[in-house]
Amino acid sequence: MLEDTQNGLSARLGRSVQVYDLSQPLENGMPCSPSHPGFHMALMRRHGDLMRGAGSGSNEIITLGGHVGTHVDALAHVAAEGVLYGGIDAVANSVGGRHRELGAETIAPMLCRGVLLDIPRALGVSRLEAGYGVTASDLEAALGDGHVAAGDVVLVRTGWPQVYTDAQTYIGHPGGAPGVTGAGAQWLVDHGVRAAGTDTIAFDQISPGAGHSQMPAHHILLVKHGVHIIEVLNLEELSTHPVREFTFVMIPLRLVGATGSPVRPLAVVESPTPEARL
């Protein structure tokens, strides 16, 4: 299906493009943060259960939290000292079973410049170690002679999807998981990003044995500066492309009053010329 999208875009734009799917599939048994309800799907009606003449239909029921699989955090997701972004009282905002302000329905669709910061490539490794903290210096090293402009979306690759099929390892129990430190999050803010994402389950650095108790990057991005966080990306295929900037496309679901939304982000990359491949 992505090939059809890719071919259609290439024809409309008059130049060759490649489209990369940055999401992880949603399926039973997938990794899920211990703080959130997991993903469950079951067929409620199978073909043959109910026949209408020669035809039949099949359907399912799906239950999941807003922070399962590849997703974006709404600004209502995290509070610090009882306050959400913009000084909104977090408790009062959640009365009535949904957030009155800053819910997932307020996350604007994103069609903008994206930048990939490949930390393992910058450090000369295939993936970061469990519990590794991505610092501002790491982000600078991965950026190299590139640049981040105000309004960009920056995606930070750790290589952690390489352990995605081992759910306990991926979520960081008990060995921790790589992620962005508080100083790294401030670097992103200082560069004016509209959103930041990683290929881990928590964005923040998860130290061995610490669990998800300390989340300074979430506080800096969501609460202090109103920067959305995207988690559980799959950046492995995109990282094989020689170009580090692209058109980023992401459309959240309009889940009124929710704290997050599943998404299927895309990176649209102009195919390099033969000279660029040398």
Image: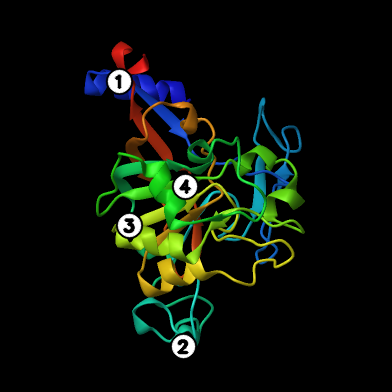
Q: Identify the amino acid type marked 3.
A: Arg
Residue for badge 2: 92
**Residue 178 in the figure: left or right of residue 278:** right
In x, y percent, where is residue 255?
A: 46, 62
Q: Nearer the viewer, mark 3 or mark 4?
A: 4
In x, y percent, where is residue 1?
A: 48, 25
Q: How many marks?
A: 4
Q: What whole-number distance in Å separates the C-alpha atoms at marks 3 and 2?
A: 27 Å
What residue lies at 45% left-to-right and 83% top-to-bottom? 93
Q: Nearer the viewer, mark 4 or mark 2?
A: 4
- Contact (Cβ within 8 Å) of mark 1 with mark 3: no
Q: Earlier in the sequence, mark 3 or mark 4?
A: 4
What is the secondary structure assignment of the residue under circle 2?
A: helix
Residue for badge 4: 156
**Residue 9 in the figure: left or right of residue 59:** left
Q: Identify the amino acid type marked 4.
A: Val
Q: What colouring style does the render use?
A: rainbow
Q: What whole-number distance in Å separates the C-alpha atoms at marks 4 and 1?
A: 27 Å
Residue for badge 1: 10
Q: Identify the amino acid type marked 1.
A: Ser
Q: Residues within 10 Å of mark 2 (few under 14, many from 20)?
A: few
